[in-house]
Amino acid sequence: MFGVYIDIHRYVNVVLYPDDQGPHDPIRLRLYTLIAASDDEVCACSFVAAIGRSQPTVSHHLKILRDSGLVTGTKRGTWVWYRANPDIATEVTQLLPARISA
């Protein structure tokens, strides 16, 4: 369990809260929050309107989330469907409110 805890802190600190973006990266944080809040997979096509950013920007941040292991993606036709990584989703979600309010 302790090893997973360290990995989760690395994900939250490096991926969701990069130093060059201030206290947190709002786009990445919002994307992760939308994905984690869903009971099912979420289509990448729904994020552009929800985030209010261009498709290339959304794709860039989704790739970082996917590469970090915070989310998984399944390509179906043109679109990728995302889901929070079930192995760490509960722990990551528990860490988010404390960091957002800080």
Image (spheres, grey):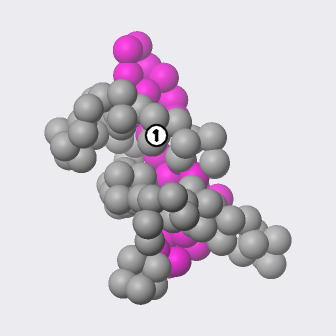
The residue closer to the viewer here, 45 or 22, is 22
Q: Quadrant of residue 21?
A: bottom left
Residue that badge 1 annotates: 62
Quadrant where the N terminus sits is bottom right
Q: Residue at x 42, y 52 (%)?
A: 28
Residue 85 horizontal/vertical position (percent): 57, 52
Q: Is residue 100 above or below residue 49?
A: below
Compared to residue 22, the image places residue 46 above or below, namely: above
Relative to 46, residue 23 above or below: below
Q: Quadrant of the C terminus?
A: bottom left
Residue in the image at 19% along x and 43% along y? 52
**Is 74 in the magenta?**
yes
Q: Is residue 88 something one can see in this rendering?
A: no
Residue range in magenta is: 70-96
Can you say whether 99 is above or below 40 in the image?
below
Q: Going by the picture, which residue comes out furthest to the top?
A: 77
On screen, residue 30 versus residue 23, left or right, reads: left
Residue 36 picture quarter = bottom left
Residue at position x 30%, y 29% from top? 55
